Amino acid sequence: MTQRDRDRLVVLKKAQKKLIGQGQAARELDITSRQVRRLLQRLKRDGDKAVIHKLRGRSSNRKTGLKIREETVRILSQDVYRDFGPTLASEYLEDKHGIHIGREALRQVMISAGLWKARGQKIGAVHQWRERRSGRGELVQWDTSTHDWLEGRGETIYLIHMIDDATSELTARFVRHDSTEENMRVLRTYLERYGRPVAFYTDKASLFQTAVKSPRYAEAPRDQPELPPTQIGRALRELSVVWIAAHSPQAKGRVERSFQTAQDRLVKGLRVAGAATLEEANRYLDEEFVPWWNQHLVVSPAHPADAHRLLDKSCNLNAILSVVETRQVTSDYTLRFQGKIYRIGRADVRPGLRGGRVRIEVRLDGSIHARFQERYLTIEECRPQPRQQLPVRVKPAARHLPSKPSEAARQSISGISRSGGMPVWKAARIDKTRG
């Protein structure tokens, strides 16, 4: 008998001895007067055991059967279900194997079988949560996660998340590289599906903010000139979407926590699905994970109005979501780009074009387009002329040097140089004026 049962017994005995009325006993026990009369009848018939529930000590009628418990343990002991928690395991048991078992009952089964270890709750540091935005589309958090998503079954891939701050609605995509082009493709998917949000909230990665170049260990100057935007920053400006930079990972906690959920549930789901390629991972992401997220984890916004703006005719996504550079047109109406020379079509020549600045757009499909003011130009790559083959110069044959003179030849030559005659000093004294 518990302390609560003993307290109830004291109140019932007071009512039995007419020390208090049945109404007062009902108020003290927080039950109805009718239930008090039933308990008094049981007290008279069974004694003090009247306050003990008759089902105490008996097995519940809803207890999971031994056969189902054994089948559950056998399934969850497979390697593919390793480190599954009770919540996720109960969902997979019902969806994949047709076994319906409650989360708490499954937790007890897994603990008794050694498949799950109960963990005590830890009280973390108190953090003042920022309130959600009131309307859908007011703020969208955007980030990329590097994780071993395929657990070594395939290539290294990255996960890009875009999550609405007001509703937690998710848009996600696996990519091979965390590059400008891949992020622009995910941005295009979001814009075509929902429209233009008011603002994007990201970190200060080089994709979104131009890094300040300064010598190492040197203090940054206080009055810095405004740096040119990155390609994504320029695209957001042309879309009239505000870019907000987070000063710490905790500032964009909603998207960071979404990655924690994905690194648990998504990794295990990809394992069960046997995904080993980028295409298979994206198929599971689109068909299973994102629909589950948007069905179970999305909340209703405080304000029902949608802040997304439609894509009007001025929003040419092919032109905006591209890598844009500028080039100057030369006097012969050509321009240089990526080490190649392009010639502008004769029909597109107009005043101000020669010496003017042309916008070069490298689209996501790899095509190159040139625009001068509001008009696109026809450009054609100038093929270099083949070089003429110069005649091959034949190297003249080497001349053979004469052989060294023999010893006899050297003696004869030295004999000629030593011919007998008057010494030079005597010849110099001869008087040549005499006849």
Image (cartoon, rainbow, N blue to C red):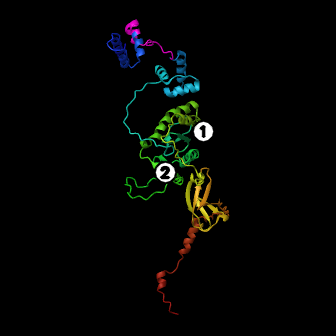
Any magenta on residue 43?
Answer: yes
Q: Is residue 24 left or right of residue 142?
A: left
**Magenta stretch bounds:** 41-62
Q: Residue flagged by tag 1: what amino acid is it? A: Glu
Q: Nearer the viewer, mark 1 or mark 2?
A: 2
Q: In the drawing, what numbered circle is on residue 242?
A: 2
Q: Quadrant of the N terminus?
A: top left
Relative vertical location of residue 48 with respect to residue 258 in this rendering, above or below: above
Tell me where residue 417 sits by quadrant.
bottom right
| Residue 245 location (% of width, % of height) | 45, 48
* Of residues 407 and 164, the one drawn nearer to the viewer in this rendering: 164
Tell me where residue 405 sits by quadrant.
bottom right
Residue farthest along the bottom direction in this orientation: 435
Q: Residue at x 53, y 23 (%)?
A: 76
How dense is the environment of label 2, judged by Cα within 10 Å: few (below 14), some, or many (20 and up)?
some
* Of residues 154 and 435, the one drawn nearer to the viewer in this rendering: 154
Any magenta on residue 54?
Answer: yes
| Residue 200 location (% of width, % of height) | 49, 47
- Tag 1 secondary structure: helix
Q: Residue at x 38, y 55 (%)?
A: 220
Q: Residue at x 40, y 28 (%)?
A: 121
* Of residues 202 and 386, the one drawn nearer to the viewer in this rendering: 202
| Residue 82 location (% of width, % of height) | 51, 27
The residue where tag 1 is placed is 279
Relative vertical location of residue 200 with respect to residue 345 in this rendering, above or below: above
**First in residue order: circle 1 vs circle 2:** 2
